[in-house]
Amino acid sequence: MIIPSSSIEKASDIRRDVFLRKYIYSFDEGDKSMRDLLGGKGSNLAEMTGIGIPVPFGFTITTEVCEYFVSKKAYPEEFAEQLEEKLNLLEIRTGKKLGDSKNPLLVSVRSGAAVSMPGMMDTILNLGLNDETIEGVIANTENARFAYDCYRRFVQMFGNVVLGVSHDLFEEAIEKIKEEKNVKQDTDLTADDLKKLVYDFKEIISKNSDEEFPENPLAQMKLAIEAVFNSWDNDRAKTYRKINNITGLKGTAVNVQSMVFGNMGDDSGTGVAFTRNPSTGAKEFYGEFLMNAQGEDVVAGIRTPSRIEDLKEINEAAYNQLIEIKDNLEKHYKDMQDIEFTIERGNLFLLQTRNGKRTSHAAIKIAVDLVAEGLLSKEEALLKVDAAALSQLLHPQIKKSIERNVIAKGLPASPGAACGKVVFSADDAFSWATEKDEKVILVRKETSPEDIHGMHVAQGILTSRGGMTSHAAVVARGMGKCCVAGCAEVIVNASAKKIIIGDLVINEGDRITLDGGTGEVILGSVELEEPKMSEDFKTIMDWADKVRIMKVRTNADTPKDCQVAIDFGAEGIGLCRTEHMFFDEERIPMVRKMILSKDDETRGKQLKKLKEFQKGDFVEIFKVMEGKPMTIRLLDPPLHEFLPEKEEDIRKLAEDLDTTFEDLKMTISNLHEINPMLGHRGCRLGITFPDIYRMQAQAISEAAIEVSAGGTEVNVEFEIPLVGFDTELKNLKKLVEETILSYGDSVNFNYKIGTMIEVPRACLTANELAKEADFFSFGTNDLTQMTLGFSRDDSGKFLNAYLEKGIFERDPTETIDQAGVGQLMRICIELARKEKPNFEIGICGEHGGDPQSVEFCHKIGLDYVSCSPYRVPVARLAAAQAVLKI
Amino acid sequence: MIIPSSSIEKASDIRRDVFLRKYIYSFDEGDKSMRDLLGGKGSNLAEMTGIGIPVPFGFTITTEVCEYFVSKKAYPEEFAEQLEEKLNLLEIRTGKKLGDSKNPLLVSVRSGAAVSMPGMMDTILNLGLNDETIEGVIANTENARFAYDCYRRFVQMFGNVVLGVSHDLFEEAIEKIKEEKNVKQDTDLTADDLKKLVYDFKEIISKNSDEEFPENPLAQMKLAIEAVFNSWDNDRAKTYRKINNITGLKGTAVNVQSMVFGNMGDDSGTGVAFTRNPSTGAKEFYGEFLMNAQGEDVVAGIRTPSRIEDLKEINEAAYNQLIEIKDNLEKHYKDMQDIEFTIERGNLFLLQTRNGKRTSHAAIKIAVDLVAEGLLSKEEALLKVDAAALSQLLHPQIKKSIERNVIAKGLPASPGAACGKVVFSADDAFSWATEKDEKVILVRKETSPEDIHGMHVAQGILTSRGGMTSHAAVVARGMGKCCVAGCAEVIVNASAKKIIIGDLVINEGDRITLDGGTGEVILGSVELEEPKMSEDFKTIMDWADKVRIMKVRTNADTPKDCQVAIDFGAEGIGLCRTEHMFFDEERIPMVRKMILSKDDETRGKQLKKLKEFQKGDFVEIFKVMEGKPMTIRLLDPPLHEFLPEKEEDIRKLAEDLDTTFEDLKMTISNLHEINPMLGHRGCRLGITFPDIYRMQAQAISEAAIEVSAGGTEVNVEFEIPLVGFDTELKNLKKLVEETILSYGDSVNFNYKIGTMIEVPRACLTANELAKEADFFSFGTNDLTQMTLGFSRDDSGKFLNAYLEKGIFERDPTETIDQAGVGQLMRICIELARKEKPNFEIGICGEHGGDPQSVEFCHKIGLDYVSCSPYRVPVARLAAAQAVLKI
């Protein structure tokens, strides 16, 4: 060709732009910047074509045509001519002809707006088939069954999507023929059966539609294009746009693309490949193919595909072309690509390229490598790693290759995997693990603070109730322990020591495996693999730290957890829960005596003992923290959580307390609450039992004085929980401050006094609270529960239905509900910073480790996020990505 | 006097206003408009003096002097001269002299800012007493004990308040002398004992203060004035101003007023009187007095006072003067007055006048009478009646004269009084009442919907848990039944069938009486009286209806309650709870079968039966309502509330359902929720069990069609409860709408579909919800609980402490928390009306019957309030008052 065809096109473009409107673009006329006009799919096809990738040729009808058509129910002038012109060009480029019985051009017709919209008509494949062209396909593929399967699918799809005939009618016809032929699977139908179905389908259309199935391929195309246009304004699409707030679009584009077939003989084939190893990230071409096959054959696994390297021997030119394309794609898209290709009669076509899915491990290696290769800047590389998936790297995993016998599925509450024998109580877990050295999985309806000792020794935790922020989930994440929560299919009968799942019964001592990353419960033990922390991981983390603005703290209650978190890069503690320290075996009797004491003196005696224990805890933690800021929350849970529930434990305690079982049982039952989450807890305890808060403030102060005196800096933030009224904060701030000041000149450490923001009212009156407080920390677990009015412990009953029916896009206990909870947070921050411009505000709810929520926190101006130790790297990366995304 | 002293003063005023600053005003120089300068107390004393009331004379030092003194620690120039001048005038007017041993002038010194401030120094009495003037008091009163008691009190008060000596030291000295004299009461001390105490006190001051007790009355006065000024800036006062947002005041004024004594012989006396009968409202002078006595004597009841009419015989001039004053006061203050007077040596002085407290009955009569007498406009009269107290008139009351043996006090949850025998279960209540025809009081830790049948037949309800909006309280108010809730002193042991209150044990069958207006629990039965509804009551209600803008609806679930409410003036139903209809004995088995059915078919069968019952209910209610708007809330409570709790009931149900006790118990226990308020309820039920909501929508539609066809208009508002997300509302609106439309052309009634606003998130996303809804109704019970993060069922444990410590000014479940919940309501209304300007918004929480909350609802623009039937008149009046107050 003397004058390349692309120049000719461009010249004619100029003419059109001046004199006429251009309604249709061939794939070689656009690029990805033309998304508004060509839609997402169309502009991508054009982009690929533009960089020289051999995409099956085709053209895109613009969104403007759709707009015109929808409003006027007609096409613009000149449209028909342009369509004919583009079609001619397509026939020339493919060497095929629409309606030709020897070498028929078959096309797909697809919708594609600027924003992906599942509400619209999607795809019609193999358009162009009719009773004549089918012969060409049979001849070319030498596969009549395949050809008729394409044909019947096309008629069915066309009948349903374009002509509006009910899907059920076609399915009934299939069922009928299967009955007649006495076969079970669609795949058991022969070419003749399918041929008969084509005619049955046409009859169904004839009876149930105003129009007959059009044999004329041009008529097929016209109707298909109009169906796409009309789908733009159907109810589903309108609702979808409304719900997703999609406005300002002109309409959908229509992509008409030639079909290619990998099953046209031994010089044809099809394959999938990754430009790098998606599992390890190694820079190696990785994929497989099948000759004389179509895409489904590779996926279905009926024939064993060959390794991509073997293509070289079969068709060296195609292989070399593929290698070149692979490199170009990586350069162009600056990322590892997942490609699908087809070879039709020796000619290579790319059907799809997209950024390839990969393991976290691979994601990190690829990102670091692409920077080294000069393809990406460090900032771009940071955005290539899925922060949420990072935590995969920090926990043991089920080996990829293992086949899983999944018996139930719950919420993926804490990542990692665990195998062990089923036990039904924390005590059993403890004794099995410590005395018999067994690996156990603790199975409970739900866990409570009383179960901590059992959770500590268990490999993993399975609960039938509770959500992503239930006690089990939160504590397990804190411990970096695998947990599947809210697994409603599982009926836990703890007294009979068995689990019932449908017909399956699992008894105490039976082995199960949990995958905390997927929520799967697996029967038996399967092999796990340990995590490896790579150099590349550290590199990515370093880059992230340089970019991010928000600090990352951790939620940790023990010196060990604090050390783990610091090793993961935590810059402080955002939430240290003091109550967890109360559950120690040695201490809980004192706690119980303290709670049940009838006079101040007895209570005082127990508190004095407890103080020494708490002081010891804080001394250890302060030493580990080495001056990093540390928010310590004063006692939060309702007191009845510390009391025994089981009859034998109550009996024992009654003896200890020198009272009767009946009396004690009644006292405990009187402390029971109907809605404990909204009960006598948090600062309400501090106000009704000031001695407890005073003891805690003393323990913290004395520990801080001791550690400071030893030369280690201490920065402590006293946190008052569950504040809703400034009067509460004033009252308790005074108590804490007076306690600290009672140490007079000994006070050698830095301290702040602030509050957790977890009650909606606190957000609404944040200006008043900010007057009193030195800092705020959003407790978004409780804030979410109160703002949305649902308890994480009870939401299991409807959460799945909500997610399935699309009432919730996401579980709001996992990702901050921005419109509700987020709005309260914004109000809070605005009111507080109006009062004190540089006021310190962080978040310590579980959302602090969720990347989307971290991004939101950055947007609204939080100073730090705090999350469980194992999510610290996730938060570090997410905080950096938040900076880069804005 | 040729030139009256008041003219002289006025002339000198002019001079001062021009040349000098006027720092002190005698009582005859000011009026009530000078509050800023003279303080509240000073301007009132001036006002009374100004209208010719013989108030003991005195003067007021202005707030400007305080401001000057506080900032400069000195008095302005000329102040001393002005003080001397005013003091001279006071001596002339009283005929007494400061420091005179024969006829000493004694004064009180009181602080008094423009706003009442309990944080400041209050009062010093009998200033001017010293070792010389005491002799004059003894001679004049012929009562040495009285004189020395005044003296020792003065020294003590002065020592403590002015010189800062600890109160305890004085109390110790009193205890010591009581021990020495071997007496128990202060009143047992003799004149000599008290005389000795005076000297002991002076010694205490000498030892514990830099200054001696000043014998010089002028020095006493100077120090007292300065103490008042200094109290303006003490911590307590500053805190008080900060907490109560009091700003812009200059300082406090100081009132110096001459003391008068009613115990100066048989020509002296003292009394209290109401200008009208405070109990009935009758226009009759009503009071009593004692000659040769001081105020305490009248109150203490040691001597029997005489009726006010008898004063005529003793001192006709004073009596006539009192009658004249009484009439003037009513004319001036336009209200019934409560006055205190003293006659000193034949001269009448008024010590105080204030609007008199009265019963609701009297309040209404007085308000109507004052309009008839031309003293008040109707609007002014409406503001004179305490709306909250109106409900007193609608319930039986304990006879005023009855002595009460109060054994415990809980929350006054539902007004009225009730006597009966104690029973501990709803079943017992039911069988005792229906079979034995006994009057019973149902005593429970808390009630649940299962107890409804027992509550219905009980005279009153007593619970040991729960607040003003607990189940017991809400249901009792709805039934117009007396209830004392959250009575924490009471330990209910239902299994042993006894109540324990300290050492007292009350067994089943013992009689108690409840006062739901005060929260008192009384041992035994006491006499009750029936309410009388007066013509005046109707008059006031008529006036109120003409003034108010907001509509008043009622919360009612039965035709009977609806009729009661309409008789009380309800204009519609704001909340009809459909679940109460489920608890009927005949229906509950179907409800239970429906809930526990394992397949759709069984559920469908039960729902079909239930539909007929519900339809019948609605037919009856629609007939009663005669076209008034009626909001019907679809099923709200968690399903487990409908299931039995007791073992025997579970056994019975298991038999019915043909299942085992163990299985059923496990199923029920699996339905149990940890925080049921935040659980699987409201619209969450509608979404997970659409069949239930569909059944209810059918029942309502069919009933509406039937009643409409019978010629009675029907206006029904379908209400979806607990909505937090617009997607929830969309889903269920569609369900309801489709159900209604399935009746096609039969639909002959008016309907709206809307939602209750009770989840904080609903307020924050009200614009989205308003797009879908036809109306909103604030469910402030739950909205308060979620916004403040406390459950009404559990708040009993800390609510009292919160009220006592001033953390809460008011119980937010009684009166809307404006800063928190109210702010969310404002946000909601703004967002909704931006979307739809005339959008209908009401309130159906219990706050709808609380006058302060009603006023708030008017301010923020609600269309109606809805409350329990017996509070409808309260709401009508409060809504009118809200209009008049703005």
Image (spheres, coloured by chain):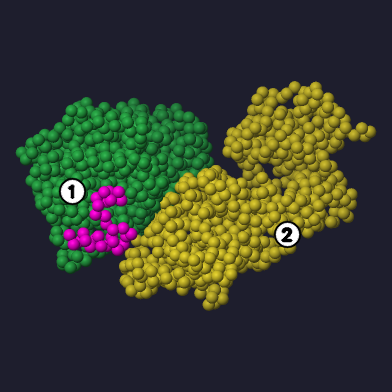
Chain colours: A green, B yellow
Label 2 Cα crowd, 10 Å radius (few <14 / some 14-19 / many 20+): some
Asked whether B15 or B402 is in front, the reply is: B15
State the image coordinates of residue B526 (x, y, percent, origin top left): 64, 67
Residue B730 position, x and y percent, is: 43, 54
- Residue at image position (8%, 46%) is A266
Extreme residue in the left direction: A313
Q: Quadrant of residue A550?
A: top left
Amino acid type of the residue tagged 1 in the rendering:
Asp
- Above or below for B451 versus A355: below
For label 2, the residue is B539
Mark toward the viewer: 1 or 2:
1
- In depth, the one of B593 and B693 nearer the eye is B693
Q: Viewed as shown, does residue B541 lie left or right of B619?
A: right
Q: Where does label 1 land, which residue? A: A100
Image location (x, y in percent) of residue A40: 30, 40
- Cα–Cα gap, marks 1 and 2: 95 Å
Q: Chain of mark 2?
A: B
Identified at 82% across, 39% down, the residue is B50
| Residue at image location 52% in from the left, 60% down from the top | B751
Q: Are marks 1 and 2 in contact (CB under 8 Å)?
A: no
Read off the magenta span.
A195-224
Q: Position of residue B103 (x, y in %)?
A: 84, 37
The residue that appears at 41% across and 42% down in the rendered structure is A247
